[in-house]
Amino acid sequence: MEKEPQLFLLQKQLGYAFSDPALLERCLTHVSYGRGKEDSHNETLEFLGDAVLDLAISDVLMRRFPEKSEGDLSKMRASLVNAAALAGKATQLNLGELLRMGKGEERSGGRKKKSILAGAFEALLGGIYWDGGYEPARRVVECYFSSDIEERQLGQHDYKTRLQEISQMLFHAPPVYRLVAESGPDHEKRFVTEIIIGGEVLGRGEGQSKKQSEQEAASKALAHLQQSREASVKA
C-alpha cells in the first residue's frame, strides 16, 4: 500500500489499528478515483459513519450532561456536527494528503474541499465501526470532540460574553483578543491568546483551539478585574 508510514501515523493518531488494511484504504478513496464497484470507494462507509457519529456524540453528551433536556442535547449535537467541524477533524488527521481521488477532482482542489474532507472523516468512523465495532469508534469520537464539548459546556459560563459586558461598562470599549502564539503539528495544535483591555494585557489563555484559548484568557481577565475591584474596596 502506498504511503504506509503516513497510514501508520494515522492509525496511531486515531488510537486504532485496522485489522483489514484494505478497508482503511477504501475509507480514504474518493468516489472520483477509478470509478467502478460500490465497494471500491468510501461513499457507503461515509453513510455508515454519519450514523455512527450521531450515535457516539449523543452517547458522549448524555453521559457528560445527564441533567440536560432532549432539546438542549439536540442543539449541542447540531452545533458540534457540521461539515466545517468534520473537515477540521480531517485536517487534524491530514486526511487531505492521504486521500486517493481522480485527477480532475484533484486539479479542482478536492484535497481541501470541506465536503470531501468531512466525508472522509465520516468514512473513517464508518470503517472503524465496520472493522472493530462501536466502542473503538466511540472512543475516537470522544477523543476528537472532547475539547469542542468542553467549549459548549463553557456556554453555561461564557467568560467572553461576561467580559464583554464588564469591559463596555468600565472602559466603554470591547476587549481585544490577540493571538500571540501557535505551535505544534496539525493534529496537536496549541494556541495562546492575550486579552487587552484599556491598553493593558489582563489575561492570557492557552488551548487546543483559538476559541478555547480565548475563553481561558477571558476567564483570567475576569479574575484579574475581580481582584483589582476587591483591592480598591479594601484600600
Image (cartoon, grey):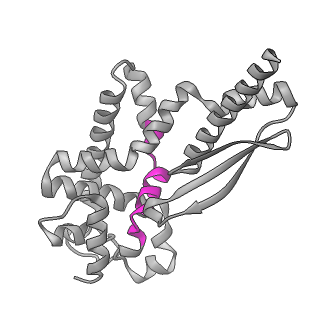
Q: Nearer the viewer, residue 41 or 196?
A: 196
Give me the residue at 41% from left, 61% from top: 90
In the picture as drawn, the residue positioned furthest to the top comes out as 233
> Where does the image place residue 228, in percent across and percent down from the top left?
76, 27
**Residue 11 part of the magenta-drawn span:** no
- The stretch in magenta equals 78-96
Q: Nearer the viewer, residue 99 or 178?
A: 178
> Where does the image place residue 38, in percent across and percent down from the top left?
21, 67
Give me the residue at 26% from left, 80% from top: 4
The reply, left or right, for residue 121 in relation to residue 210 is: left
Give me the residue at 37% from left, 59% from top: 119
Give me the residue at 32% from left, 70% from top: 31
Q: Main secondary structure of the magenta part?
A: helix
Q: Within the image, what quadrant is residue 105 found in?
A: bottom left
Quadrant holding the C terminus: top right
The reply, left or right, for residue 223 in relation to residue 209 is: right
The reply, left or right, for residue 14 in relation to residue 74 is: left
> Where does the image place residue 85, in percent across and percent down from the top left?
47, 50
In the picture as drawn, the residue positioned furthest to the right comes out as 172
Whether residue 223 is visible to the viewer of this picture, yes or no, is yes
**Residue 84 part of the magenta-drawn span:** yes
Residue 117, compared with residue 149, is above or below; it is below
Whether residue 34 is visible to the viewer of this picture, yes or no, is no
